[in-house]
Image (cartoon, rainbow, N blue to C red):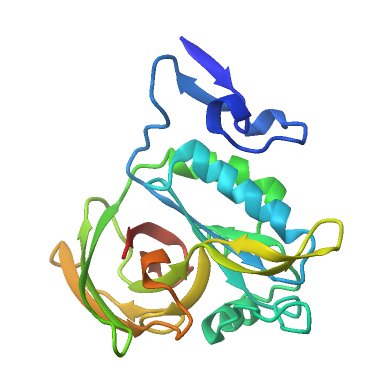
Amino acid sequence: MKIKILAFAALILGLQACDEIPEDEYLLIEEGSQGYQGTGHRVFLEEFTGVKCNNCPAANQKAKNLQAIYGKENLILIGIHAGNLATTDAEHPKAFNTPEGTELFNFFQLFGVPVGFINRLDYDENRMIKGEGDWAGVVATELERQPVAEITLVEDSYNAGTMELTVSGNVSAIGTLPDNLKVCLYLTENDIVSAQTLGDKSVNPNYVHDHVFRGSFSGTYGKTIDLSTGSASFTESITLPSDAVKANCEVIAFIYDADNYEILQSNFIEI
């Protein structure tokens, strides 16, 4: 027997739920289960945002609510600050924009925030950019797919003096994969307290920013990886931003089809 559970119900998830819940944001869970049981195919939601964007906190909360439903082991989040609403001023001393985030924003011809990519689907159909109203349905559908690869990650070393972090990992094929594959590693940080414009256009100087994109280990688009033998390993390093708190950081690794940008698998570790 299946039961409907309100995705955002405070009694179930301990989340804020002040808005009416659309029907497509309910979650079907087997009665008696302890939560969502995924197939092993993870979803990577790249949310483009900005500290001056008054609509972005609500979109960010929607992404967090979805992650609370499905679990961070199934739905991986990143907040990419880019565009003209990701700039500093007297009220916003930090903007969190990065060269890589700006490159993605420009390359994929984004024109505003908040918007998102979900596994970078639908590039060929010119429907890659997803508004927040599309996220729940696309995430649910994508999570039902069977995995075609697995990624493992481990922290190798960290030099506290230079703030250089080194991680290694392995990608294994477990299904049919395209020939032109790339692997990419991104650094994110949670629990950053800094100013954010809110929905009523006031500024909260103590807003908590999570999943903030802080940089890439190997450039915006990563490196080619050869899985012709079934698996391949990688080792990459990054110097953390000088204001980063390592204990709040995570490393995200993903592989994608370099011909259409579709992300085929992803994973993350806390460091």
Determine whether, in the image, residue 107 is placed left or right of residue 28: right
Residue 129: tell me if it is visible. no
Q: Quadrant of the C terminus?
A: bottom left
Q: Nearer the viewer, residue 181 or 151?
A: 151
Q: Position of residue 26 (x, y in %)?
A: 61, 28
Q: Nearer the viewer, residue 133 or 120?
A: 133
Residue occupying the far bottom of the picture:
162
Indicate whether 135 appears above or below 21.
below
Determine whether, in the image, residue 146 is placed left or right of residue 201: left
Q: Position of residue 71 (x, y in %)?
A: 43, 42
Identify the residue at horizontal 51%, vertical 45% (top origin).
Answer: 67
Number of marks: 0
Identify the residue at horizontal 30%, vertical 69% (top origin).
Answer: 179
Q: Position of residue 106 (x, y in %)?
A: 65, 81
Identify the residue at horizontal 55%, vertical 87% (top origin).
Answer: 99
Residue 55 falls in image quadrant? bottom right
Determine whether, in the image, residue 85 is placed left or right of residue 74: right
Determine whether, in the image, residue 32 is placed left or right of residue 158: right
Indicate whether 57 appears above or below 111.
above
Q: Position of residue 171 (x, y in %)?
A: 23, 63
Residue occupying the far top of the picture:
1
